[in-house]
Image (spheres, rainbow, N blue to C red):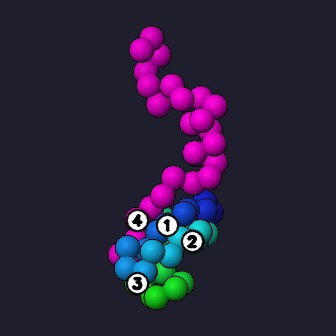
Amino acid sequence: MPIYEYKCEKCDTNFEELQTKNEKVVCPGCGGTSLKKMFSLFAREFLIFFPTFDRPLGS
């Protein structure tokens, strides 16, 4: 199961959640469900070292 990072739009809590595809995620701080999925630490670090990874070859 992948780990996702979220930020609660209600209380600004940042948290990680080990989640299955259809599992409902709630904020551990306030129980809110208005969440924004963030780039994981791995994704941020990967894009720093490979900034053109998301572009087609030849661009």
Which mark is on residue 36?
A: 4
Asked if the residue under mark 4 is in contact with the one under mark 1, i.e. CB atoms within 8 Å, the reply is yes
* Element carrying mark 4: strand
State which tag comes first along the sequence, 1 or 4: 1
Amino acid type for the residue under numbered disc 4: Lys
Asked if the residue under mark 3 is in contact with the one under mark 2, i.e. CB atoms within 8 Å, the reply is no
Image coordinates for residue 4, horizontal then vertical, percent: 55, 62
The residue carrying pointer 4 sits among few (fewer than 14), some (14 to 19) or many (20 or more) residues within 10 Å by Cα, namely: few
Amino acid type for the residue under numbered disc 3: Gly
The residue singled out by tag 3 in the image is: 32
Q: Residue at x 60, y 35 (%)?
A: 48
The residue singled out by tag 1 in the image is: 6
Asked if the residue under mark 2 is in contact with the one under mark 4, i.e. CB atoms within 8 Å, the reply is no
Image coordinates for residue 42, horizontal then vertical, percent: 64, 48
Q: Residue at x 46, y 88 (%)?
A: 30
Range of residues picked out in magenta: 33-59
Q: CA distance from mark 1 to mark 2?
A: 5 Å
* Element carrying mark 3: loop
